[in-house]
Amino acid sequence: MKEQVITDLKKILGPRWVDDDLERVEQYSKDHTLQSYGLVAPAPAGENLVVKPGNTREVSEVMRYAYARNLPVIPRGAGTALASNSVPSQSSIILSLERMNRVLEVDDVNLVVTCEAAVSLGDLIGYLKGKDKLYFPLHPGDEGAQVGGMVAMNAGGVRAVRHGVMRDQIRGLEVVLPDGEIIQTGGKMGKLAKDNAGLNLMQLLIGSEGVLGIITRAMLKVYPEPSYTATLIASFARRSSAFRAVPRLIKEGIMPMAVEYVERDQIITTARDLGKEWPAKEGEGDLIIIMAEKSEDDFYSLANGIDKICTEEGATDILMADSAEEQKEIIEIRSHILPAIEDQIVDSPDITVPRSKLEEILDFLDSLAEKYRTRIPVLAHAGDGNLHTFIIKENGQVPSFYEELKEAMYKKTLELGGTITGEHGIGSLRRGELNLQFSDRELEIMWGIKKVFDPKNLLNPGKKVFPPHTGKNL
Amino acid sequence: MKEQVITDLKKILGPRWVDDDLERVEQYSKDHTLQSYGLVAPAPAGENLVVKPGNTREVSEVMRYAYARNLPVIPRGAGTALASNSVPSQSSIILSLERMNRVLEVDDVNLVVTCEAAVSLGDLIGYLKGKDKLYFPLHPGDEGAQVGGMVAMNAGGVRAVRHGVMRDQIRGLEVVLPDGEIIQTGGKMGKLAKDNAGLNLMQLLIGSEGVLGIITRAMLKVYPEPSYTATLIASFARRSSAFRAVPRLIKEGIMPMAVEYVERDQIITTARDLGKEWPAKEGEGDLIIIMAEKSEDDFYSLANGIDKICTEEGATDILMADSAEEQKEIIEIRSHILPAIEDQIVDSPDITVPRSKLEEILDFLDSLAEKYRTRIPVLAHAGDGNLHTFIIKENGQVPSFYEELKEAMYKKTLELGGTITGEHGIGSLRRGELNLQFSDRELEIMWGIKKVFDPKNLLNPGKKVFPPHTGKNL
């Protein structure tokens, strides 16, 4: 990055908050995608620069400066994304929001918590703990993820069955536009339950992966804290039975926090890897059902309902873990599935299908694995039809059949009414695959919207949207 | 409308489905706004034409034709809107979706009902009744409202406390774009619980009031049917106590279907107008709390919780109506508040504030009423901070202070973190008021998005979005 730019940005932010140290810039040029899969290479560190504004006004000033000089800017949260969503693909200013990490207010009348962008999920959970008996339910996995990034990515995770995804938690946003203008959605306080004025820019910004604006503040719904929690493990001889049980639960009004499906082989291997033992032994796989209720009555009514339906659908064994320790161990093993195989993975498409199509897509993945003589481990958010599939290396390398297998997986997913990404978004990694899902006209509209917000294409360029009729990496 | 256009459209749709009969066209040129308030005048009937396509392909063909010839098109549902949202302001083709009125599927695994655009809310409720014990919870008031219009308007209503607004019910849409292209959101079946591919056009189309595309089909969430229902009336000596009770209910995890606030004088007068008696007598006003639960246990637990909190907050009397007949009578009286005064009203802004600001805005409205020596009757969706305010005629005419009062109301609303419309949308009626709420840059973005979808500005022109820096009626 040119010396003049560094000097100018130091004037705006103070010298301490502009960093061109090669080693540190390199760290900021990666996200979780790169560290594990290495499919997308960032621009060389020497061409980038890290800036750390301390407040919204400073974010705005940096944007105003960069916009006037046509400098690309990459907004960055915790870098926990999995589709190269914040990796610079050209010489860029990396704008880290890390200093903006305060919880500003817990409003227990409107039930809204106001966070700066870099409040981490873990910090938010900790902050709310015990406070007015309120809590934030979403849990996309990595508690290092930051609120701004979770909004920009429309994060999901295991707990979407009852509460939905990040989109469903947002009352308001403060956003810095590419030209530096600051806007506020959801009214001046970001606390509106209903708003039909104008086109809904907030809904467009949620999940836009930092290509339309920089989320600097988010107003999120909070809920009454559940007092009674437990985790059920229901084992099924066949996964088809497990998948029949899930919609029946929801249809009966039994809404657990989470309904996960794990395959028997994989969860046992994972537990062994941790030096632990998975409590269920029989059958093809288990449903892991996380319950959290406010009253003891509600809790037992829920547990009984789940037990009844799973048994009717042929569960061979149902275990309930209600001590904090047992529950923690189950979640620990479940959460270790990915780390246990991470160094063997080249890619993990998070395809999503209608809940009714889960068995069909899993059968298809089995047939693909057989065809390519590989294995395709899968984690299933069974309540949402959302899969994490893992494409495994061949002799430590990207396998020869990688592109072919991925395309077959996507095509089947789309044929079944699915999407190529339910959670991780498009980033740079899947941008070239958008045309499998969308028509040229749809891509033209998305690209047109990008240009309305960012006519110079400076904010997180090369991500999320792809212009139609061209392979150009804009 | 030119003879050639009539001839051409008859070729596309068949002669029966193109109507230029003056009297009938005039009916289609009005909506509920005009009938009651008369603030916006439609283009003369002689300049318009009504077409009634029977399926999505025909909607697409009409749009393709109109787009090629630069003819404005006004999509039309039931015409129950309240802000001139489907009134032609220039010579137009009025595209009524009325023939597309079939419920196509109830999917009890994904819990999704697929409706054509003109399925009315009443028909949907009737269709689902008893079917697989599923139901659709939203109730924006008029059961004649059609699904397509409810999506285009992001309808709300009394039952948003538990289930949210229309936006929260939508899994997928089929939409015809201004140039006739058909797109499908939420995957090919419109049944996805998670989708992060591309910019979310579906969220942008919801609530876009027919300026970006024509909703031809909607895939909506359905829920387990509640078996136990009752309506509580809690009377409070002061409305401030009522408004303190509401957030406490929600914070305790007590989520009724609806929490309405009615003022004592008004509800008593309304009941009298119907020749009935309102059961509560004492205090400034009542909370009407609608409960609907799946099990008897849940129901009693909810009712006890409500009773306890309302009593603690000073409710002087709590009545429970649990027979179908009593409940119907309460809802009938509550629903009659608007009809009872409709001929006295010139306008009914549906301002919305954060729940915590309800009392402040109501006190302000009282002071406004006093200042202008008028009364401002109010209905409050107290759980959502959403008010229906009624500006009353002066000697049967638009009062001299109308503009002044409205502007003061809007400014205070915005100052308190509110929006000028929580439910009714912008239409033609409030388009000129968007600049009170949004900056020029925001309006520029909205207008830019409109142009991306509809470069010729032919679809429902003159509604919803307003170009910045100009008073031109585009």
Image: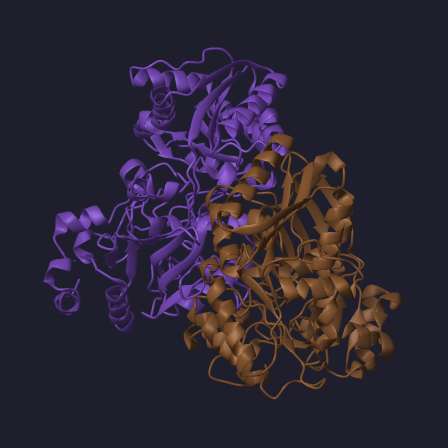
Chain colours: A purple, B brown
Specify whether residue B61 is in view. yes
Residue A191 position within the rendered picture, expressed as x and y whole percent measured from the top left: 44, 58
* Residue occupying the point 50% across, 56% down: B241
Q: Which of B242 and B395 is in front in this view?
A: B242
Question: Image height check: is B404 above or below B336?
Answer: below
Locate the C terminus of chain A by quadrant: bottom left
Question: Image height check: is A243 above or below A182?
Answer: above
Locate the N terminus of chain A by quadrant: bottom left
Q: Nearer the viewer, residue B90 or B131?
A: B131
* Residue occupying the point 61% across, 69% down: B211
Q: Which residue lies furthest to the bottom in this view?
A: B400
* Residue occupying the point 57% across, 64% down: B387
Residue B297 position within the rendered picture, expressed as x and y whole percent measured from the top left: 61, 30
Residue B251 position within the rendered picture, expressed as x and y whole percent measured from the top left: 46, 45
Q: In this view, does A5 lie to the left or right of A165?
A: left
Specify whether residue B170 is in view. no
Residue A399 position within the rendered picture, expressed as x and y whole percent measured from the top left: 38, 31
- Residue B105: which quarter of the image? top right
Q: Is residue B142 left or right of residue A228?
A: right
Count of number-bearing discs: 0
* Residue occupying the point 40% across, 43% down: A136
- Residue B269: which quarter of the image? bottom right
